Amino acid sequence: MEMEAAKQIGAGIAAIALGGAGVGIGIIFGNYLAGAMRNPSAAAGQFTNLLIGFALTEFTGLLGFVVAMIILFG
Amino acid sequence: MAGDVMSLTRLLELPGDLGALRGLDLAKLLDVARSVETDPMHQFVIQRWAPIHVGGLDLSFTNASFFMLLAAGVILLFLTLALSKRALVPGRMQSVAELTYGFVSGMVRDNLGEEGMKFFPFVFTLFIFIFVANLLGLIPGFYTTTSQLVVTLAMSMVVITIVLVVGFAKHGLKFLKLFAPSGLPILMYPLLVPIEIISFLSRPFSLAIRLFANMLAGHILLKLFGGFVISLAGLGVAGIAAAILPLVTNTAVTALEFLVAFLQAYVFAILTCIYLNDALHPGH
């Protein structure tokens, strides 16, 4: 297989990681919203935890993105 | 249709012969569209503005160094101007400065307690520098310093060094209890201690890569949709009509990038607080 073609395919496969991050972020925000609907008074106090969870989840997807960038341009 | 093309080219501020565009010469429009730099990675290239070589080190003054200095200058100017009057009833500028102060000091106090307030200047500096550098990067033509891994890694290394120094200075070897949470069955420790150590060692990298990759991804996305607009506009009348779609998307992505600029600065600061909390109160 040509090197360039292999690189493109590899970068595409590495980008699949972003799908997992999308699912994870959806679960975090969805569950936060569900919890906030049940007990709105407690929602404000958990907003920081929401953002931390979002950041930690997003990181797993970004690793995939960085790997794709390294494959393409590294 | 002529009005559409004029407003579109004005919005995009296409370089090249704009006089030709007014005459609506599609062949020349095509040429201009092809001459525009559409490589999404081009914006991250470091240019040496003033080459300085000391020994074997390359200490050149680059566009990245300039925009870091610019960010620091903007912060200094803003805070000095906003707080020069020090009115009892704050004006608009002073309110923004006080809100920022209150926001970060609340964050530090919530996470570290009153004794952690000695770290407030550090966290405030990190927060406002990352925030302003991200915002400056959103101005078209400006360089995004936070999209360089070396910049974010330097900041996260400072954070983790402070955590280690404060932790060992304050608790001595008891700081190592961070890696062995108490109250577990003894069999769990051989499994848990390596995991905790790996998790601790990956912190500076996760902190740096999160900020760097977010900025990189966002700016590539902006450039990609901008490139779609230009290459579609070069296809002729139907292409110009279709180019409105990526233009609208790009506007929406720009709005999202403003949110990301704030969110990443906030996340960096709050994770710094959490890591510093480990240094002040190890052993969960």
Image (spheres, helix red, strand yellow):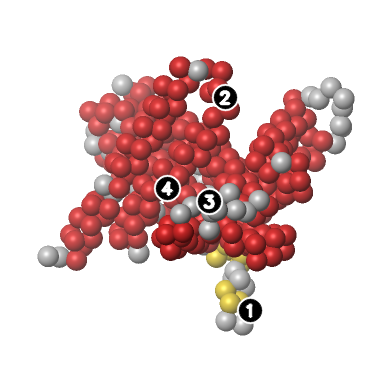
Q: Distance between the residues labelled 3 and 4?
A: 30 Å
User: What amino acid does circle 2 point to?
Assistant: Ala
Write down the quadrant of residue B101 in the picture.
Answer: top right
Horizontal and vertical percent position of residue A47: 54, 30
Q: Distance between the residues labelled 1 and 3?
A: 54 Å
Mark 1 or mark 4, which is nearer to you?
Answer: 4
Q: How far apart are marks 1 and 4 (CA)?
A: 37 Å
Q: Which residue, given by chain and number where applicable, does mark 1 sit on?
A: B54
Vertical relation: B207 (above or below) B193: above
User: What amino acid does circle 4 point to?
Assistant: Phe
Mark 2 or mark 4, which is nearer to you?
Answer: 2
- Please state, as top left, top right, bottom left or bottom right, where the N terminus of chain B lies in the image: top left
* Residue most extreme to the left: A1
Q: Distance between the residues labelled 2 and 4?
A: 24 Å
Q: Do pointers 3 and 4 mark residues of a single chain?
A: no
Q: Which residue, given by chain and number where applicable, does mark 2 sit on?
A: A44
Q: Which residue, given by chain and number where applicable, does mark 4 sit on?
A: A59
SS at mark 3 in the image: loop
Mark 3 or mark 2, which is nearer to you?
Answer: 3
